[in-house]
Image (cartoon, rainbow, N blue to C red):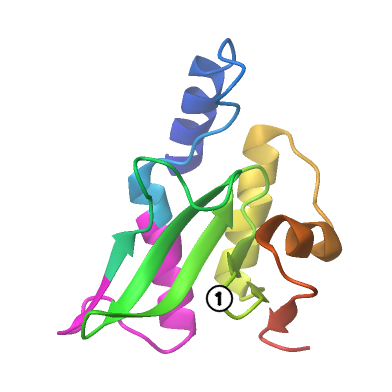
């Protein structure tokens, strides 16, 4: 159902040259929750929460939707989802997440949008990192 919503939203915005793809906020929260749980954080626990990272209505990294994981009001993780491919990265620590649930989301997103995989090197450049560590490591 969620992927169908993404496809519908993608088709709705085809005529707009600025917005090519869109991830609903509910999907961004779902994916960020998966990433947090994969890393051992529970966003439902007291003092831990997710919050969008938009500034003046704009995403901090073009082409990505970003959400922060906070613990006791301190940003501890910065999850950015590459909208075209579903790759999940943390640009604060230059890491790309390859947990099984996030890889599944990535594959579903690329299939829904009809997009091709981006190289880790290209993603690193997009988010301002020299290189990206892969989590979990192989």
Q: Name the side, left or right, on which 88 lies relative to 47.
A: right
Q: Which residues are magenta?
A: 29-49
Where does the image place residue 7, in percent across and percent down from the top left? Answer: 54, 29
Where does the image place residue 129, in percent across and percent down from the top left? Answer: 72, 70
The quarter holding residue 34 reads bottom left
At x 61% / y 76%, what residue is drawn?
99
Residue extending furthest toward the front:
56
Query: Which quadrant of the rendered structure holds the C terminus?
Result: bottom right
Front-most of residues 1 and 114: 114
Residue extending furthest toward the top:
15
Query: Which quadrant of the rendered structure holds the N terminus?
Result: top left
Where does the image place residue 87, in percent across and percent down from the top left? Answer: 64, 59
Residue of label 1: 92
Where does the image place residue 50, in percent across and percent down from the top left? Answer: 30, 67
Front-most of residues 110 and 74: 74
The quarter holding residue 89 reads bottom right
Judge whether 123 appears above or below 93 on screen. above
Mark 1 closeness class: few <14, some 14–19, many ≥20 residues within 10 Å: some
107 part of magenta stretch: no
SS for callout 1? loop
């Amino acid at each position: 159902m969620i992927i169908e919503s993404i496809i519908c939203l993608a088709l709705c915005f085809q005529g707009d040259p600025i917005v090519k793809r869109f991830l609903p906020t509910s999907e961004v929260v779902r994916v960020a929750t998966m990433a947090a749980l994969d890393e051992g954080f529970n966003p439902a626990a007291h003092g831990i929460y997710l919050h969008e990272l938009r500034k003046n209505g704009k995403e901090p990294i073009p082409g990505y939707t970003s959400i922060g994981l906070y613990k006791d009001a301190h940003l501890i993780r910065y999850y950015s989802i590459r909208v075209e491919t579903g790759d999940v990265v943390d640009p604060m620590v230059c890491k790309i997440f390859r947990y099984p649930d996030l890889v599944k989301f990535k594959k579903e997103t690329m299939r829904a949008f009809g997009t091709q995989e981006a190289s880790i090197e290209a993603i690193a450049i997009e988010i301002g990192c020299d290189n990206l560590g892969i989590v979990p490591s192989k």
